[in-house]
Image (cartoon, helix red, strand yellow):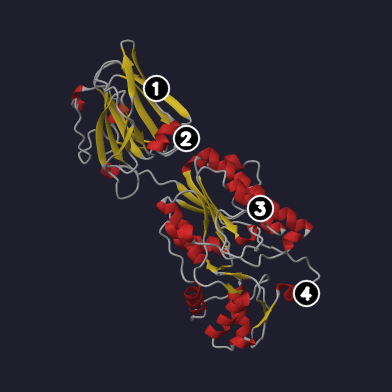
Amino acid sequence: MTAFGKALAVTETTIPGLLLVDLPVHGDSRGWFKENWQREKMVAAGLPDFGPVQNNVSFNDAVGTTRGIHAEPWDKWVSVATGRIFGAWVDLREGESFGAVFTAEIDPSRAILVPRGVGNSYQTLEADTAYTYLVNDHWSPDAAYSFLNLADETAAIDWPIPLAEVEISAKDLAHPRLADVAPIPPRTTLVLGASGQLGRALRTALGDGAHVEYATRADLDLSSPDLATARRWRDYGAIVNAAAYTAVDLAETADGRAAAWSANASGVAALARIATENGITLVHVSSDYVFDGSNPDAYTEADALAPLGVYGQTKAAGDVVAATVPRHYVVRTSWVIGDGRNFVRTMASLADRGVAPRVVGDQIGRLTFTDDLAAAIVHLLSTQAPYGVYNVTGAGTPQSWADIARTVYRLTGHDAESVTAVTTEEYFAGQDAPVAPRPRNSVLDLTRVTATGWTPRDGAEALEAYLAADRSPGSESAPGSESAPGS
């Protein structure tokens, strides 16, 4: 019997992500009414905003009709329009919960959210039973499905009506036992900018598993008119955009301006459309250059954007469009150091050659090492931190480029006093090529990312560890940097 007057309530089950829901049903002598899916109320109650795109209805006229255990690569919201069913769910996803079982009866006052990769099966307990299901993807012959035999001894489902007495299709009877089931893989994580210093750090952090894909521009062109069909995007769970145009001075030229806007704004807009339409989490890596550096305090995620030059303007535009994606992380960082050409390696090389450099001393910030930045991105994704903007840099006392240069000289056994601090204007004086304006204050507040449980490394300790590893036997340091603010 349908229970009337229940309050909307969400109950977790023994299978991660499989949520049993009590639905309010209102009835009188004329019949009954319920809100089968009410996005605002149900998301507020704790259900995910899973974005259904199709509504299906299944009808069974005979008691005992049993449908096989099928796992599909989409999420499914199942409820009963009339009648009553016994439902059995088996986790067929890769991972520790593979093989976990949950069963329950479903009538019009109950529904269940079945996550992607969880096998579902139903047995009708009343004649003329109809159940409906919303799914957040369209059926495709190219999608990955998995199946389990209804009589599997490991799952050991206690069917109310013995399987020998019910109607089952020949196809369902032929499905494999659990030991032979091909698990449903997780959605793919796509890393763009795979050949860059952050892309390489992300490869180290995420590994080379079958469900992580790395792409360069040659592999996936964001300006292509065929981008929407370049992949089966519904199979992707996250896109990490580590690609960008970063030549800040060249961006002030005519050709550089066009290239910067194409990569940092138009490309992000294309990704945002893909992510929004397919329920993908977009991680977009941004920059301190979205600010003008006039703030006397550390910049928070809520501070107004005020870029100075073309590069900063294009990064700010990318931030704005990335934030339109329902599931997004905009990760702002500064002064990035990785395994390619960079300021630290330039200073170490100059120190080894006995050069006494002039280094900018009126720009203040913190170094960010790519392995830390990659770790923070993985943390946000794996913990499903609240979506939004996060500042991610090294921690510790902010310094100028000249301060950092002196530290590099000292740590490499050279005279730190041979580094001369100059103003930004002095450093760039006499250059014929265009020079982009730099923010003088690049310090980013780290309170929000720290609150998610990720602890930034102290910048001084990270720098010392980086130099030690970089100069150890067998390392492949690459001296020099075309953008290093010191010479």
Number of residues whose C-alpha sits closer than 10 Å to that of mark 1, classed few (under 14), some (14–19) or many (20 or more): few
Q: Against 285, is 128 above or below?
A: above
Kindly give the residue lying farthest to the front in the view shown.
Answer: 296
Between the C-alphas of marks 1 and 4, the distance is 72 Å
Q: Amino acid at mark 1?
A: Val
Mark 1 or 4, nearer chain start: 1
Residue 470 visible to an observer of this rendering: yes
Residue 247 or 365: which is nearer the viewer? 365
Between the C-alphas of marks 3 and 2, the distance is 29 Å
Q: Against 57, is 146 above or below?
A: below
Mark 2 or 4, nearer chain start: 2
Residue 311 or 136: which is nearer the viewer? 311
Which mark's residue is nearer the viewer, 2 or 4? Answer: 4
Which mark's residue is nearer the viewer, 1 or 4? Answer: 4
Q: Mark 4: which secondary structure?
A: loop
Number of residues whose C-alpha sits closer than 10 Å to that of mark 3, classed few (under 14), some (14–19) or many (20 or more): many
Marks 4 and 3 close (CB-CB < 8 Å) = no
Q: Indicate the position of residue 216 as horizontal and vertical percent values.
A: 59, 55
Q: Amino acid at mark 3?
A: Ala
User: Mark 2 sits on what residue?
Assistant: 51
Q: Indicate the position of residue 282 as horizontal and vertical percent values.
A: 53, 48
Q: Amino acid at mark 4?
A: Ala
Q: Is residue 469 left or right of residue 25?
A: right
